[in-house]
Amino acid sequence: MKSIILLCSMLLCISFVAASYPSYPVSIQHKLIGTWQDGSRGGQTFSQYDIVLSNHGNKNIKQIVIGTDATCRLRDNNSIWNVKVVDGPSFIDFLILPSYQDINAGASYTFGYIIHGSSPANLFVKNVIYA
């Protein structure tokens, strides 16, 4: 009886986790463009990345919400392009496509940023709205 209750509890936990993080047919690829030390900024290390969002689905994407965390430490407010930034209280909360941009089925879209350090920011798909 205890093992059945334990098994049911585990299955319930798994179902909550699966429901919280839906899976979308979208991939996020980081491409390092370059890393350097900036003498005019006290020798700080910066890296430039291109981010490729690929739509592997059979529907066009009208909007996508890309989540991030405190690892997304941009060099300054001009160090991100081809994407709209939505700020949280202490860091970038999420990124969305510009209003004029879609990602067609089977196509990709690229944006870029310059970040402190040499590691890419943690990025993940939070939501997708299809056309």
Image (cartoon, helix red, strand yellow):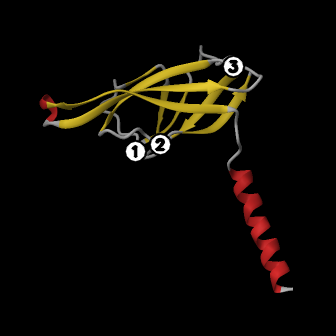
Residue 101, percent across and down?
A: 60, 16
Do we see residue 98 in this rendering? no
Do we see residue 55 in this rendering? yes
Mark 3 vs mark 2: in front:
3
Q: Secondary structure beneath disc 2? A: loop
Near-viewer residue (38 or 83): 38
Q: Which one is earlier in the sequence, the residue at label 3 or at label 1?
A: 1
Residue 10, percent across and down?
A: 75, 70
Residue, disc 1 = 71
Disc 3 marks a residue whose amino acid type is Gly
Q: Is residue 74 above or below residue 1?
A: above
Disc 1 marks a residue whose amino acid type is Thr
Residue 92, percent across and down?
A: 44, 39
Q: Is residue 69 above or below residue 65?
A: below
Is the C-beta separation of discs 2 and 1 under 8 Å? Answer: yes
Report the side of 21 relative to 68 (left or right): right
Give the position of the N terminus as an image quadrant.
Answer: bottom right
**Distance of mark 2 from mark 1, alpha carbons?**
6 Å
Residue 100 occupies which quadrant of the picture?
A: top right
Residue, disc 3 = 106
Q: Secondary structure beneath disc 3? A: loop
Report the side of 48 relative to 62 (left or right): left
Residue, disc 2 = 122
**Distance of mark 3 from mark 2, alpha carbons?**
24 Å
